[in-house]
Amino acid sequence: MRKLDTREPDFRARLHELHDWDANNDPAVEDRVREILAAVREQGDQAVLAYTRRFDGLDLQEAAALEIPPAQWDAALASLPPSDREALLLAAHRVRSYHQHQRMETWTYTEADGTVLGQRVLPLSRVGIYVPGGKAAYPSSVLMNAIPAQVAGVPEIIMTVPTPQGQINPWVLAAAAVCGVSRMFTIGGAQAVAALAYGTASIPAVDKIVGPGNIYVATAKRMVFGRVGIDMIAGPSEILVISDGSADPQWLAWDLLSQAEHDELAQSILIGWDDAHLEAVAAAVEEALGELDRAPIARKSWTERGAVIRVRDRAEACAIANSIAPEHLELAVADPEDWLPEIENAGAIFMGIHSCEALGDYLAGPNHVLPTGGSARFSSALGVYDFVKRSSLIHASPAGAGTLGAVAERLASAEGLTAHARSAACRSKAHR
Amino acid sequence: MRKLDTREPDFRARLHELHDWDANNDPAVEDRVREILAAVREQGDQAVLAYTRRFDGLDLQEAAALEIPPAQWDAALASLPPSDREALLLAAHRVRSYHQHQRMETWTYTEADGTVLGQRVLPLSRVGIYVPGGKAAYPSSVLMNAIPAQVAGVPEIIMTVPTPQGQINPWVLAAAAVCGVSRMFTIGGAQAVAALAYGTASIPAVDKIVGPGNIYVATAKRMVFGRVGIDMIAGPSEILVISDGSADPQWLAWDLLSQAEHDELAQSILIGWDDAHLEAVAAAVEEALGELDRAPIARKSWTERGAVIRVRDRAEACAIANSIAPEHLELAVADPEDWLPEIENAGAIFMGIHSCEALGDYLAGPNHVLPTGGSARFSSALGVYDFVKRSSLIHASPAGAGTLGAVAERLASAEGLTAHARSAACRSKAHR
């Protein structure tokens, strides 16, 4: 873990080093993925079956076996202990309630001359949700990606989840059963992205693909973008905790580690001005590391990417947070409402010492798919917005076209566009 | 121009050919752009000055000369003939009025136990608007890109516009004067994108870059994406006109050509079922071609990319429109309101024979930056939405964290994430 201090002369350079992290594209991965995309595009189901055999060790004889039928999801849900099932249902309910606030409605307005202008909002027709399998099989990913699509009203939600060696995570199936998934296929990797983008005889082509995945999945998504929509490409996860010392150091240690345990590249940063408190948290982290199931991952993350930044005051703390633009910002302070106006850039803001990131990851309500790598400066959480398309509506009345046509003619002439000018002029003359 | 007919056996294949058009990346361009980005990133203003000398033939001795001061924009606005100035002001006013309907507000809600959840919406801090110079210097581009940012409340709007050989288009300067641009720099190409993305001593780094440009600009935007946000990469423009025969064929000819005159790769498609009418429009197009300032461009576009599609009925017309998902859809029909429910995918819908695309390009109100290449299936017009960032707000009350923490602990355990579970458990136990 690095220690930085704003009073040191090289602080700016060290801060820059901390968060200026570029994910490089790997040309070998790109070549591999290009090959997989082409094979699935040309050979359809046969290629998907072959890659699934090769990469997931799952030997299916026919394409129909790629689909996991809804009865199996329901069975998985029914098989969970009642309290676990209730936990899942509560999470789905809360996430749904939050996202309902994001619904966009169609609107129009009519001008004095009868011209109607507006914006029509429709759900996307069909979307694909990529859910990672194996060790990173997260039911919360299913909820966070599918529910905004469900709330948007997307009629067909196609989910893919790889099942290496046939291993199916019942939590993932159960999650699909409670959030509007339409069909599920037991595929993963670049071949799943290809199948969703191009369609095969058994797997329908979608309009947009969302969901996290490894470097092959991310590269495949980037490559099919344009043919289909994609969500952002997620980088390693980050948390930034600003502490005024009012939280138990132990609590903050768990918060910092809940990021570090995700991924060796994840980044946890603590900011404060109370030296003794900062040291106490750092010590608590060291101690807590031993208790984690995923201790090696968390230790590597904390050691190599973690940081404690000692600042002079609140203004410095906010300025640093804004320049980092963290995915998760915890304001572990007594008066978080008072801090809010000074915070400009953060994917999600956890206010006060009771609002730990883990609540947001699972069930507080907001989406846990958040902008990473400083992109909170210009982008936002996954939401219902990502699952609708807006069409502009222009219905000019004869009188409206008369007035506007004359002006459009003038502007088009200034741009040297004759046909635009003539097209507008026809309408304008017709009304005179 | 191609003629298609749904009654022909190879119709599907020919339709597919028509709109399955892939813009290929050119590796030579990519190498060139990579070099420019690196040079500007390392040498800042000096590199920008050198490229501006080389590519724009503009020999400036010092970086300060790269900026065009606001007094010069105001002078350009004042120099326009009064009726032209009024046209520009009316366009800006109407575009602004429309976009004001897109403003998003911050919202929060409070749960029974005192937990507050919400979404805070803030404008981006600083955005860059790329405006092409030279032959494609469009004042309407300035309005359509800057006004949504202005309405969003972006405090700093930085515009770049190349001025080859020092040629400045007064309309472009005048447009900047009426739509909230903060500063303007006389640069273009990949070097302008680099300067906006990385910043130089004289040109401030921005959070997002929008605006159309040539292949170098588009490639540069793609490459800096991640460090900054970008808008969509626009492909060639398209119009699809569905005609029931109620419009004068001459009108529709101008409409089709107003797309074709943009670009040799632009695509104009006419759909209808009345053979005589379709032929009359096609004949009117041939005749009108001779009258255009940009006749060679429009002729190439119409000949090589244009199409007339003869369908059996309205249902077929709508199905084809939805599968093409055009940037601009003109419903040149007597009862456009009645057609609307059958239209699923289109960037902008021009309803009725008085609503020509040219009105929308300049001043009807909706944005003219629209999804091309079929991407209206999953994306939408540029809007105020593109210039704001949303932060999720989570302020758990002690009681809320108590209840939710216990459930989060259970879900985290299902995912094997110890620190998440412990972090939630602390809050849960504190409340018991």
Image (cartoon, coloured by chain):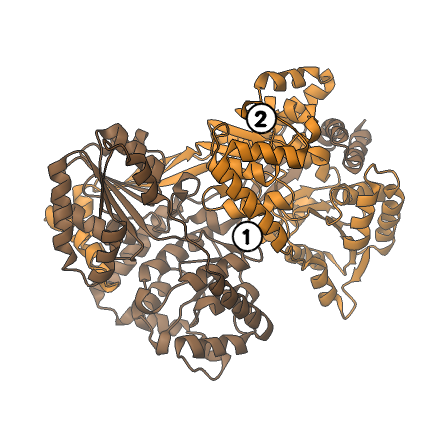
Chain colours: A orange, B brown
Q: Quadrant of residue B341 in the image?
A: top left
Return the residue nearer the eye: B416 or A46. A46
In this picture, residue A139 sits left or right of residue B180: right
The quadrant of the image that shows the C terminus of chain B is top right
> Residue B405's x, y, as percent?
74, 30
Which one is nearer the viewer's eye here, B286 or A208? B286
* Residue where numbered disc 1 is placed: A378
Does residue A152 appear in the picture of this structure? yes
Image side of residue B219 versus residue A329, left or right: left
- What distance separates the C-alpha of mark 1 from that of mark 2? 39 Å
Q: Could you say which quadrant of the image residue A253 lies in?
A: top right
Image position of B400 with respect to B186: above or below: above
Amino acid type of the residue that numbered disc 1 sits on in the rendered structure: Phe
Q: Is residue B137 left or right of residue A72?
A: left
User: In the rendering, at what x and y percent does residue B265 appear?
Assistant: 31, 55
Residue B57 position within the rendered picture, expressed as x and y whole percent measured from the top left: 39, 79
Q: Chain of mark 1?
A: A
Residue sitting farthest toward the bottom: B61
Give the vertical position of B177 relative to A86 (above or below): below
Q: Position of residue B182 (x, y in %)?
A: 45, 65
Q: Residue at x 23, y 52 (%)?
A: B302
Residue B79 tag number: none
Label 2 secondary element: helix
Q: What amino acid is found at the position of numbered circle 2 in the picture?
A: Leu
Numbered badge on residue A66 = 2
Chain for disc number 2: A
Question: From where the camera sits, is residue B248 visible?
Answer: no
